[in-house]
Amino acid sequence: MSNDAHSRQHRVLCRIEDIPDGKTRGFAPIDRSHRGVFAIRRGQHAFVYVNQCPHAGAELEYAQDRFLSADGLGIICFAHNAQFDVETGSCIGGPCAGQALLAVAGNIVDGAVMIPTDAGRIG
Ligand code: FES
């Protein structure tokens, strides 16, 4: 791990058990200079992304904590139906070819989902 990674500040996003397995949860921006993020739980792992679609910049969910396609297998942006791979954030369908969600480097420490403090910073 680089010195940079060591010095980067982290914060607790939530507890892993706060996200039902296989589901998603959205988190509001921490302040006006950050975007919100959302997390998808797969077992004891959480995939975290900035809540901004690369297509036209919309927040992805159609209702609170609703980020997944009807079959629960992919992330979907409800603005224009862009679809993204859960594990990589890459576009897999819709009007976002060649684009991807901005991944947040989350990890689990003693059951807490930790993310960099500056995750989702605007600009
Ligand atoms: S803004 Fe997400 S699909 Fe257009």
Image (cartoon, helix red, strand yellow):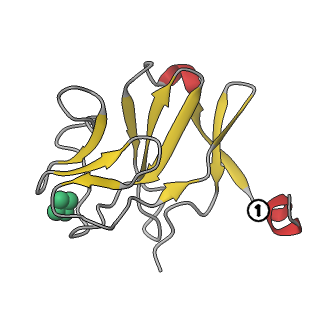
In terms of depth relative to the viewer, which is nearer, 53 or 30? 53
Q: Which structural element holds mark 1? A: loop
Classify 52 as above or below 72.
below
- Residue 51, position as x, y percentages in the image: 36, 55
| Residue 52 location, quadrant | bottom left
Instruction: Give me the residue at 83% from left, 63% from top.
Output: 7
Residue farthest left in this picture: 80
Q: Which percent across, then down, holds residue 85?
A: 36, 45
Amino acid type assigned to the residue bearing label 1 in the image? Arg
Q: In the visual, does 13 lie left or right of 51?
A: right
> Residue at the bottom extreme?
123
Counting from the top left corner in percent of width and height, residue 61 is at 23, 45
On screen, 22 above or below 80? above
66 lies above or below 11: above
What residue lies at 16% left-to-right and 63% top-to-bottom?
95
Write the residue at 47% across / 71% down.
33
Classify residue 118 as left or right of residue 39. right
Q: Is residue 114 above or below residue 5?
A: above
Q: Which residue is mark 1?
A: 8
On the image, the x and y values in percent for residue 65 come to 30, 35
Q: Nearer the viewer, residue 36 or 31?
A: 36
Mark 1 Cα shell of 10 Å, populated few (<14), some (14-19), many (≥20): few
Q: Quadrant where the N terminus lies? A: bottom right
> Whereabouts is ligand 1, in terms of quadrant?
bottom left
Name which residue lies at 26% across and 56% down: 59
